[in-house]
Image (cartoon, helix red, strand yellow):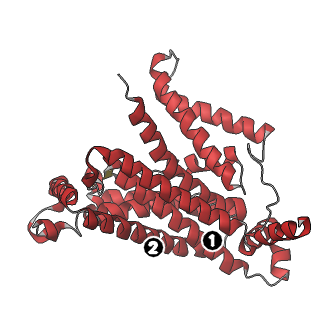
Amino acid sequence: MIDIFVLILDFLAFFSIYLILSISLNLEYGYTGIPNFGKVLFFAGGAFTVGALASRIIAPLVGVNLAEIDFVKYNAFLGIKVTNFFAENPHIALLMFIALLALAMMVGAILGYLASYPAIRLREDYLGMVLVVSGELARIVGKNYDPLICGTFGVFVPDPFSWAGRLQSIVRVAVMLAIAYLAFLTVEKLSRSPYGRVLRAIRDNEVAADAYGKNIVKVRMQVLVIGSALAGLAGALYAFYMGTVHPDDYSPLKTFVVWIMVIMGGRGNNTGAAVGALIYLLVNRTISFIKHWLYAPFDVNYLSYLIFGAIIILILIYKPQGLIPEKPSETLDFRKYLKKTKS
């Protein structure tokens, strides 16, 4: 018997992760016009940060000397000890959780800063190829450098919400949704600010923006740093939720999944990006349930690729701006002006 409540919690958890990823790509591509095809690099950066440090930084508190054990072989044993320690010390668990989220965002921001150098110098087509390669680089490093996340074995991530007991799953998902909502509000506020208008100006006409004295190079660099920090945050949440970090889980396919969400929902519109994430998850989960009951002359594991490919083609033909097209935003000053004129 399928537990509907568990399915709903799992759906909401993944929605919170994909919401952060979609609005981060929307900030880069939808508002600024940067085709970031290496989103998985920054997503993996946040996840690898959690996987590499979550157990190690608490090891001394549980009486484990990392110099005396083989972390690659015994990381699961250590992770379980740390999880049990968190069950009795919620304040340390939450402190570690917050610290690693912040550190994951910093790692994502640093990677975004490094990626901004080719981004501000290459044409869009060449930039896309460079970022795709960069995204694959993270997976290769994680797979072949064992001290990072234990290579092909992957690494166990302790549960910072083990103290919540039976409410553990509910508390975890509630925290993830709250973080995703705060990220959404932050990007929405940014897009409606004068800075957001600068981003649109650069996207629509670089020459005009440059003529008005806007530093295009600096702004693009800032956007990549912010967007990559958000992707790092999503990666950290993903690692904590899954309870493990494995390098093969961070293939370039993750990047194109996020692109599907933004294209479906509508670029330059955070609500559209959120709707795209919601639709993707609904369709993907539905396919996962029904594909094994269908007779098909091909491997049913490829059914989702066929369906989403068809959806993207139809949207690009009939709704090229997405399901929720970008609309002129009413900035804060404009809304104040309307209130004054009405009064």
Q: Secondary structure at mark 1?
A: helix
Disc marking residue 106: 2
Residue under pointer 1: 223
Q: In the figure, residue 224 lies in which quadrant?
A: bottom right
- Farthest front residue? 343
Q: Which residue is depicted at the point 50% across and 50% down?
A: 16
Q: Which residue is depicted at the point 17% across and 55% down?
A: 84
Left or right of residue 233, residue 67 in this image: left
- Nearest the viewer among 152 and 269 is 269
In this view, 201 is above or below 43: below
The amino acid at mark 1 is Val
Left or right of residue 41, residue 263 in this image: right
Q: Secondary structure at mark 2?
A: helix
- Nearest the viewer among 89 and 242 is 89
Q: Which residue is depicted at the point 25% across and 51% down?
A: 153
In the image, residue 65 lies at what x, y percent?
11, 70
In the image, residue 42 lies at what x, y percent?
48, 63
Quadrant location, the C terminus: bottom right
